[in-house]
Amino acid sequence: MANSIRVVEPSGIFDSAQAAEFCHDVDQLIACKVDIIIVDFKDVTFMDSSGLGSLVQALKITREAGVKLLLCSFNEQIKMLFELTGMERVFEVFTGREELEYQISQSQTKH
């Protein structure tokens, strides 16, 4: 059974201006009954506390809906933000999309 996977790719500065749109996108994906939401940060240059807050909010609503939220492709600034706030222990974070997709394929073959 293949999971329904969708990718969200924010870009530029992930701040309050993008946070509302991001949360709306996550809500829409949950409404579409996806199993896994991947957030790929490869095109994000900077994240502030409101961007981080929107991720925490997204994690809460995805958990309530039984949807996995996976993050990948952090730049150094986002890595540092996650380490300073302890968020790397809260979220499932992958180095890049290839590693993430490999892990998903491995978990699907075990079921």
Image: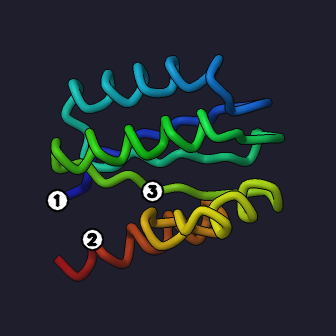
Colour mode?
Answer: rainbow
Q: Nearer the viewer, mark 1 or mark 3?
A: 3
Residue named by callout 3: 70
Instruction: Say which residue appears at 72% left-offset and 63% top-offset.
Output: 79
Residue named by callout 1: 1
Instruction: Say which residue appears at 38% left-offset and 30% top-offset.
Output: 26
- On the image, the x and y values in percent for residue 88 come to 54, 69
Separation of residues labelled 1 and 2 (CA atoms)? 8 Å
Decide: is 76 above or below 107.
Answer: above
Does residue 73 appear to the left or right of 63 in the view shown?
A: right
Amino acid type at image mark 3: Leu
Quadrant location, the N terminus: bottom left
Circles 1 and 2: CB distance less than 8 Å?
yes
Q: Residues within 10 Å of mark 3 (few under 14, many from 20)?
A: some
- Give SS at disc 3: strand
Residue named by callout 2: 108
Instruction: Say which residue appears at 73% left-offset and 55% top-offset.
Output: 78
Q: Residues within 10 Å of mark 2 (few under 14, many from 20)?
A: few
Q: Earlier in the sequence, mark 1 or mark 3?
A: 1
Q: Earlier in the sequence, mark 1 or mark 2?
A: 1
Quadrant location, the C terminus: bottom left
Q: Earlier in the sequence, mark 3 or mark 2?
A: 3
